[in-house]
């Protein structure tokens, strides 16, 4: 009788342990799924916010509300690189041209985020203070440029006036990871062009 009671107790411990491990695993999966779905939603929202600003500005390269202040199309882009571009446009429709520069910082600029790949995306208007000009946090901001024939222009670009269209890629990741995994969202615009670049 005592022998079977000990077996019952051991069996109960084993079954209880299995149920407890199963419960822990279900709980961990639930937390992980919640983290991923919630972080995906936040990432998509952040990416859309960045895209609306960047794409809106790039499509208005060379625009000016006052036709008398327009510059020739081959002078609207001031400088261009794989992760930066500077151009003129009338941001606020005042009839006066503004200088807009998009460029990325370094991971050291965002040392407070756990993600080692996070970099700030600066949107500097009229040479303002870059520290106050952060548009968003990205892990990739990449530009490829094409001429009027659709051929890619090799870097470094010595003649920005040749640029007719561009390809823009933006990637964002979570600031913090779950089990060492960072969620990410990626967007690419192929052949983005401003109407003002076409009138040559």
Image (spheres, grey):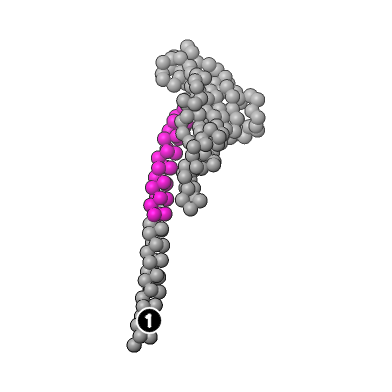
Q: Position of residue 117 (x, y in %)?
A: 54, 41
Q: Where does label 1 land, which residue?
A: 6
In the displayed structure, would residue 149 be above or below residue 26?
Answer: above
- Find out whether residue 34 is within the magenta segment: yes
**At 41% from the left edge and 62% from the top edge, which residue is drawn?**
25
- Find out whether residue 131 is within the magenta segment: no
In the image, farthest residue toward the front? 2
In the displayed structure, would residue 141 be above or below residue 7?
Answer: above
Residue 107 visible at all: yes
Specify the quadrant that holds the N terminus.
Answer: bottom left
Residue 168 visible at all: no
In this image, 81 relative to 11: left or right? Answer: right
**At 50% from the left edge and 32% from the top edge, which residue is drawn?**
121
The local secondary structure at tag 1 comes to: helix
Quarter location, residue 103: top right
Magenta residues? 31-58
Q: Position of residue 14 (x, y in %)?
A: 40, 74
**Mark 1 Cα-neighbour bin, 10 Å: few <14, some 14–19, many ≥20:** few
In the displayed structure, would residue 157 be above or below residue 118?
Answer: above
Foreground pick, 169 / 114: 114
Specify the quadrant that holds the C terminus.
Answer: top right
Quarter location, residue 56: top left
**At 44% from the left edge and 39% from the top edge, which residue is drawn?**
47
Q: Where is residue 173 in the image (x, y as percent from the top left)?
A: 48, 43
**At 38% from the left edge and 59% from the top edge, which residue is drawn?**
27
Q: Where is residue 57 in the image (x, y as percent from the top left)?
A: 47, 27
């Amino acid at each position: 009788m005592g022998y079977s009671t000990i077996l019952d107790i051991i069996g109960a411990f084993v079954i209880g342990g299995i149920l407890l491990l199963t419960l822990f695993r279900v709980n961990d999966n639930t937390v992980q799924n919640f983290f991923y779905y919630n972080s995906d939603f936040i990432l998509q929202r952040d990416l859309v916010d960045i895209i609306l600003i960047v794409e809106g500005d790039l499509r208005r390269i060379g625009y000016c509300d006052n036709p008398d202040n327009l510059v020739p199309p081959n002078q609207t882009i001031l400088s261009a690189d794989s992760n930066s571009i500077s151009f003129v446009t009338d941001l606020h429709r005042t009839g006066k041209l503004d200088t807009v520069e998009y460029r990325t910082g370094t991971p050291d600029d965002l040392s407070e985020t756990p993600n080692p790949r996070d970099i700030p995306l600066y949107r500097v208007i009229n040479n303002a203070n870059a520290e106050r000009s952060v548009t968003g946090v990205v892990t990739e901001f990449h530009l490829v440029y094409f001429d009027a024939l659709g051929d890619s222009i090799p870097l470094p670009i010595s003649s920005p006036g040749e640029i007719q269209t561009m390809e823009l890629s933006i990637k964002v990741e979570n600031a913090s990871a779950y089990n060492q995994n960072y969620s990410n969202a990626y967007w690419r615009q192929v052949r983005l062009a401003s109407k003002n670049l076409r009138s040559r």
